[in-house]
Amino acid sequence: QVQLAESGGGLVQAGGSLRLSCAVSGGTFSRFAMGWFRQAPGKAREFVTSISWSSGNRIYADSVKGRFTIDRDNAKNTVFLHLNSLDPEDTAVYYCAAKPTVYPEMTYSDGYQYWGQGTQVTVSS
C-alpha cells in the first residue's frame, strides 16, 4: 500500500520561504512521477509542479514559475517543494501525489493515483 505524508507547512510572512517534504512508503518511489497540488479556500484543487522519476524533467504552473522548486531524493523516498517569495495568494493546503510510470522523463499535471493528506501553508500580508 502506497502512503504519502506531507510535512513542513506553516505560517509565514509574505516574501518568506518554506520547504515542504513528502515521504512516500510502499511501492517503488524511484518509478513514481511526483507532483504537488494545492487547494485554496473556496477554490478547486490546482496543479503546482511535477518532477519525473529520473529528476530530468520538471514542469511548473505559471503562477509559481521562478518562485517554487521541486526536487526529490530517491534514496530517501522523499520529494520536496521549496516555496520562495511567498504571496498571500499562495495560501492553500498543499498535497503531494504519486503516479507510477514506466517513462523516466515524464512529468504529469493530472492522472495521479496516490495522494497525501495535505499540509497547510498560510502566508500573511
Image (cartoon, rainbow, N blue to C red):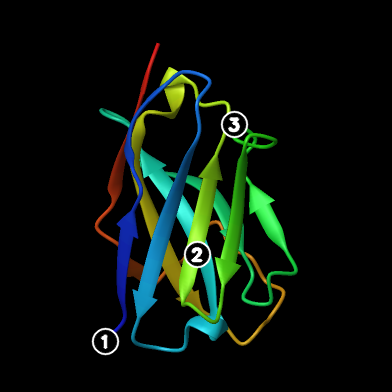
Q: What SS does tag 3 mark?
A: loop
The amino acid pointed to by label 3 is Ser
The first of marks 3 and 1 along the sequence is 1
Disc 2, disc 1: CB below 8 Å?
no
Looking at the rendered image, the quarter that the C terminus falls into is top left
Q: Residues within 10 Å of mark 1 (few under 14, many from 20)?
A: few
Image: 119 above or below 83: below
Q: Give the distance between the C-alpha atoms of the residues marked 3 and 1, in whole angstroms.
A: 33 Å
Q: Give the side of residue 88 with respect to residue 93, left or right.
A: right
Q: Position of residue 66 (x, y in %)?
A: 70, 35
Q: Give the side of residue 33 with respect to residue 5, left or right.
A: right
Corner quadrant of residue 53: bottom right
Q: Position of residue 47 (x, y in %)?
A: 49, 47
| Residue at image mark 2 | 79
Q: Give the distance between the C-alpha atoms of the residues marked 2 and 1, in whole angstroms.
A: 18 Å
| Residue at image mark 3 | 63
Corner quadrant of residue 103: bottom right
Corner quadrant of residue 114: bottom left
Task: Please indicate, yes or no, whether residue 70 appears anywhere in the rendered image.
Answer: yes
Residue occupying image coordinates x 59% and y 54%: 70
Image: 29 above or below 109: below
The amino acid pointed to by label 1 is Gln
Looking at the rendered image, the quarter that the N terminus falls into is bottom left
Q: What SS does tag 2 mark?
A: strand
Mark closer to the observer (3, 2) = 2
Image: 120 above or below 95: above
Find residue 44 and name its label. none
Q: Give the distance between the C-alpha atoms of the residues marked 3 and 2, in whole angstroms.
A: 20 Å
| Residue at image mark 1 | 1
The amino acid pointed to by label 2 is Val
